[in-house]
Image (cartoon, grey):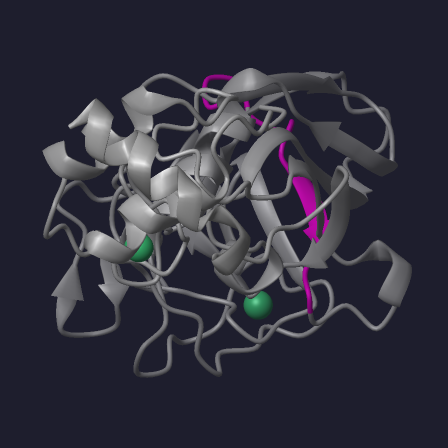
C-alpha cells in the first residue's frame, strides 16, 4: 500500500483540492427559541413567536425552561474544527432586587418546535400553543411528546453561569464547543440547548430576549471560533500522513450526509477512492487543529 501511495505521489501536480486558510470566527443568531412552561390551571402554554423566553422557578406560577437552537451547518464549512463557542443571551426582566442565581445550559437530545404562539409583553404566563409549538409536555404540540416532560436533555450541563443583573450574559467553555462540533459533524443531532435556572427557589426566574425581540442587539447570539477544514487530513490529526490513507480505507463507503466524519479527506460527505487521491494531493501538509 505504501509503495502505491508513493508512486501516486508523482501525480501530485495534477491533483488539487481546495482548502480554507486561516482561523475563522462567525456570530449567528438563533434559528428558533421558545419556552417550556410548567402546566398550570391554564394548561399547556408556549411562546414560539414571542419576544421573550423564560428560565427558572417563578414566585407563584411554576417552572420555566428556555429552549434555543442555532443553524451551525449553514454557518460553518464541512470539516471545520470548532475551537470555541460562546452563547450570549440578554436578560430583559427579573424580579426587583432578585438575588443572583445559576443558569445552566444542557444539550437537548430531541427535536422541538417553534410555531406561532405569542404571549405578548411581558408574556410570562405564555400563550395557547399553536400546532408545532414546544410545550412542557410536547416537542411538537399536540401530537409529539418529550420522553420526559420538561424536555429531553443531557443530565450534565455544558456550562453554568451566575446571573445577577439585567443585560448580556455568556456561556462558553470546552463542552459547549464540543456540542457545536458534534452538531456540525452530525447535523441530525442538532437540537440546541435548554436553559435551566435555579429550580428550587421561587422568584429567581429571568426573562431573556428571543430572536423575535424588537431590539436587534438583544437577540440571542452564538459566536463560534473555528479552524477551517484542511483537505487530506482524513483523521483530523493535524497532519496529512500515510495513516490518513488507512483511515480512508477503514471508513470506505461511509456516507456522512451534510456532516463530516473520519476518512472524508476531500470534505464532500462520502468516503471513496477520491479521498485517497485527496490525501496524496495534500501529502505532508500541516493542518492546524
Ligand atoms: Ca421564538
Ligand atoms: Ca470524500
Range of residues picked out in magenta: 198-211
Report which quarter residue 270 is drawn in: bottom left
Q: Is residue 263 left or right of residue 48?
A: left
Q: Quick check: 225 above or below 217?
A: above
Residue 273: give x, y in percent of width and height. Answer: 20, 54
Q: Is residue 113 above or below residue 20?
A: below
- Ligand 1, seen in the image, is in the quarter at bottom right
Left or right, residue 223 beside residue 246: right
Please report the residue visible at 49 percent of the width from the left and 45 percent of the height from the top.
231
Q: Quadrant of the N terminus?
A: top left
Name the residue: 57% across, 29% down.
285
Front-most of residues 242 and 45: 242
Residue 72 position in % (x across, y down): 53, 54
- What secondary structure do most residues of the magenta stretch adopt? loop
Instruction: Work out whether residue 256 can be spotted.
Output: no
Q: Is residue 25 above or below residue 101?
A: below
**Residue at image point 26% right, 62% down:** 257
Residue 273 as seen in the image, left or right of residue 178: left
Residue 101 seen in this snapshot = yes
* Magenta segment includes 208: yes
Instruction: Choose between 82 and 9: the one closer to the eye.
Output: 9
Amino acid at each position: 500500500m505504501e509503495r502505491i501511495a508513493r508512486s501516486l505521489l508523482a501525480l501530485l501536480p495534477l491533483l488539487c483540492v481546495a482548502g480554507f486558510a486561516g482561523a475563522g470566527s462567525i456570530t449567528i443568531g438563533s434559528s428558533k427559541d421558545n419556552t417550556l412552561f410548567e402546566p398550570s390551571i391554564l394548561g399547556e402554554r408556549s411562546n414560539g413567536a414571542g419576544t421573550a423566553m423564560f428560565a427558572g422557578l417563578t414566585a407563584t406560577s411554576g417552572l420555566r425552561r428556555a429552549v434555543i437552537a442555532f443553524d451551525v451547518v449553514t454557518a460553518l464549512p464541512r470539516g471545520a474544527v470548532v475551537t470555541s463557542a460562546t452563547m450570549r443571551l440578554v436578560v430583559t426582566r427579573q424580579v426587583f432586587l432578585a438575588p443572583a442565581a445559576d443558569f445552566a445550559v444542557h444539550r437537548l437530545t430531541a427535536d422541538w418546535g417553534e410555531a406561532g404562539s405569542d404571549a405578548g409583553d411581558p408574556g410570562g404566563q405564555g400563550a395557547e400553543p399553536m400546532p408545532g409549538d414546544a410545550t412542557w409536555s410536547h416537542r411538537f404540540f399536540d401530537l409529539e411528546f418529550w420522553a420526559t416532560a420538561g424536555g429531553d436533555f443531557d443530565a450534565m450541563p455544558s456550562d453554568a453561569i451566575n446571573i445577577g443583573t439585567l443585560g448580556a450574559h455568556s456561556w462558553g467553555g470546552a463542552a459547549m464547543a464540543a456540542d457545536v462540533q458534534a452538531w456540525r459533524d452530525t447535523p441530525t443531532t442538532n437540537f440546541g440547548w435548554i436553559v435551566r435556572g435555579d429550580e428550587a427557589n421561587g422568584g429567581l426566574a429571568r426573562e431573556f430576549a428571543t430572536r423575535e425581540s424588537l431590539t436587534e442587539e438583544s437577540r440571542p447570539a452564538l459566536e463560534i471560533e473555528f479552524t477551517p477544514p484542511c483537505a487530506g487530513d482524513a483523521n483530523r490529526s493535524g497532519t496529512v500522513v500515510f495513516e490518513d490513507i488507512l483511515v480512508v480505507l477503514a471508513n470506505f463507503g461511509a456516507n456522512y450526509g451534510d456532516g463530516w466524519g473520519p476518512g472524508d479527506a476531500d470534505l464532500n460527505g462520502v468516503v471513496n477512492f477520491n479521498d485517497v487521491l485527496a490525501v496524496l494531493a495534500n501529502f505532508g501538509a500541516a493542518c492546524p487543529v
